[in-house]
Amino acid sequence: MNKWVTAALLRIVGMLVDGKVLDEILRLVQTYFSETLSGPEKRDAVEQELRVLRGEVGEAVRETAGYLINLAIEAAVAYLKARSEQ
């Protein structure tokens, strides 16, 4: 996917998920993006970090449906991959 399409996808996901949650997911995915872990290990690490968040963002994560969290993670991965390829 090109970077414009993935940026648009990320924007659409941002309409479905609280902006603070999406920002945190994007930050976490970016943190693990270049790690030598496998894809599932990276996903597990991101999900684990999301589960232990405290405060306003942690509460927003817990109030977000799991399928939307998964969608946001996948959109963040696609966005970062497209950016790194260009």
Image (spheres, helix red, strand yellow):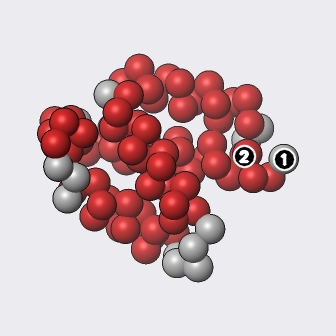
Q: Is residue 71 visible?
A: no
Q: In the rendered image, which quarter contains the N terminus?
A: top right
Callout 1: few (<14), some (14-19), or many (20+) C-alpha neighbours within 10 Å? few
Disc 1 residue type (three-letter): Gln
Mark 2 residue element: helix
Q: Residue at x 20, y 59 (%)?
A: 52
Callout 2: few (<14), some (14-19), or many (20+) C-alpha neighbours within 10 Å? some
Q: Residue at x 45, y 29 (%)?
A: 13
Q: Is residue 70 left or right of residue 11?
A: left
Q: Residue at x 24, y 39 (%)?
A: 57
Residue that mark 2 sits on: 82
Disc 2 residue type (three-letter): Ala
Residue that mark 1 sits on: 86
Where residue 68 sits in the image (x, y, percent)?
33, 38
Asked if the residue under mark 2 is in contact with the one under mark 1, i.e. CB atoms within 8 Å, the reply is yes
Where residue 85 sits in the image (x, y, percent)?
80, 52
Q: Is residue 35 visible?
A: yes
Furthest residue to the right? 86
